[in-house]
Amino acid sequence: MTDGRSSQALNLVTLSSIEHVPEAQWDALVSPEQPFLRHAFLNALEQSGSASEATGWQPRHLCVWQGERLVAALPLYLKSHSSGEYVFDWGWAEAFERAGGDYYPKALSAVPFTPVPGQRTLVACDIDAQSAFALLAKGWRDQCETLGLSSWHLLFANDNEVDAWQAQCPELIVRHGVQFQWRDRDFKDFDGFLESLTAKRRKTIKRERRLVAEQGITLRRLEGEAIDLEALAHFFRCYTITYHERGRPPYLNEAFFQALRRNMPESMLLVQALVDDRPVAAALYFRGATTLYGRYWGSEVVADCLHFEACYYQGIEFCLERGLSLFDPGTQGEHKLVRGFAPTPTRSLHYLAHEGLAAGVAEFCAREGEHVKAYRQAALEALPFKAWP
């Protein structure tokens, strides 16, 4: 170790389930902004069977111990497909397999089904980060070699982690993306937010909110333990509708959401849409210390502008009321842009064991990155604010 820190040896262990790690030790390494990296969230995925070998998400978490203390960790899954990731590499898989290679299984460090930028690599503040990253890199490299994996992917990591990983492993390929996020610019309240917009967009948002009310729909927010079993069951019915409309089963099951309600209710916000006091749609959010995350939505009714109200405007209003500075409403795009959500860059990292595949992917990502840069600039210019920093 360096910098005068503890000289006790670090030991890397691969675990088949996060339940083998004491919750308090794991959570001690997690940022208060990251509810999705909490032990309770990842354990709910595993114990419910939503993230398991059977679903193509086999846990192989990398944990660094110093004696009996967990000092670093990296969530890792063996993947037999590319579903539920939101950084799409289907084309890479098809190209490699056409050339006679096996792209699956691969290794993935991400939060399953959760494309939220943020912390991915956990390191205690009193541990030499370079030593921890070196051990974790050895862990995923060894798995790629011993298990015959084609690749390792780190998705939606924050900037300082991406920089640290690139310094540790220069061969990692960076892939750029864009998501749309809302930030409070000292708006004070929702009227202040509206006042910051151009007249056209301000008028549109007022009309959309008015349309929801004119259809006899009211909105209600339930926080934490106020989300009872009946409300959660209704939300889950709505959530499954969203997937069934697309002709596929949902990624997550009801046992997963029930576990979250039991074990981390303080991080949950449920927005219900009601007609005659009966819930007909629902959106489930999560919150960190200063950030609100919009995650899951579904509706039993077809109603004009209800999705915008439940998933965007209610979230903005909640942030302004509670002093949260950032609202991440989920993936996908331009319909968020015109409602004040700015294009925010994201980065992911990719290791490909096959040199030829790595060269092709690196070339693709470089070209794609130029298009993403141009797209983000055009999106910034299309923001509906009267003025933009």
Image (cartoon, helix red, strand yellow):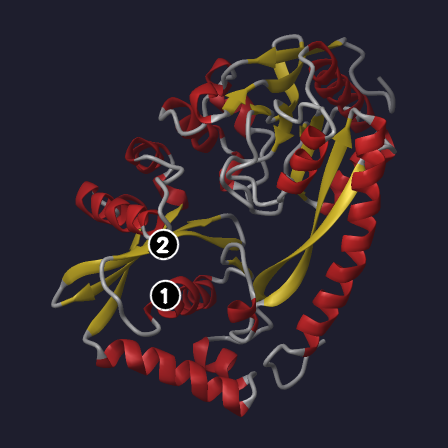
Q: Which residue is mark 2?
A: 297
One can see residue 124 in this view: yes
Q: Is residue 138 left or right of residue 291?
A: right
Q: Does residue 259 lie above or below 197 as drawn? A: above
Amino acid type, label 2: Trp
Residue 119 image point, x, y percent? 63, 39
Q: Which residue is mark 1?
A: 307
Q: Earlier in the sequence, mark 1 or mark 2?
A: 2
Circles 1, 2 touching at the beta carbon (< 8 Å): yes
Q: Residue at x 77, y 67 (%)?
A: 374
Q: Is residue 75 left or right of residue 365?
A: left
Q: Nearer the viewer, residue 309 or 270?
A: 309
Q: Nearer the viewer, residue 105 or 231?
A: 105
Q: Residue furthest left?
A: 276
Q: Nearer the viewer, residue 206 or 227?
A: 206
Residue 118 image point, x, y percent? 62, 44
Q: CA distance from mark 1 to mark 2?
A: 8 Å
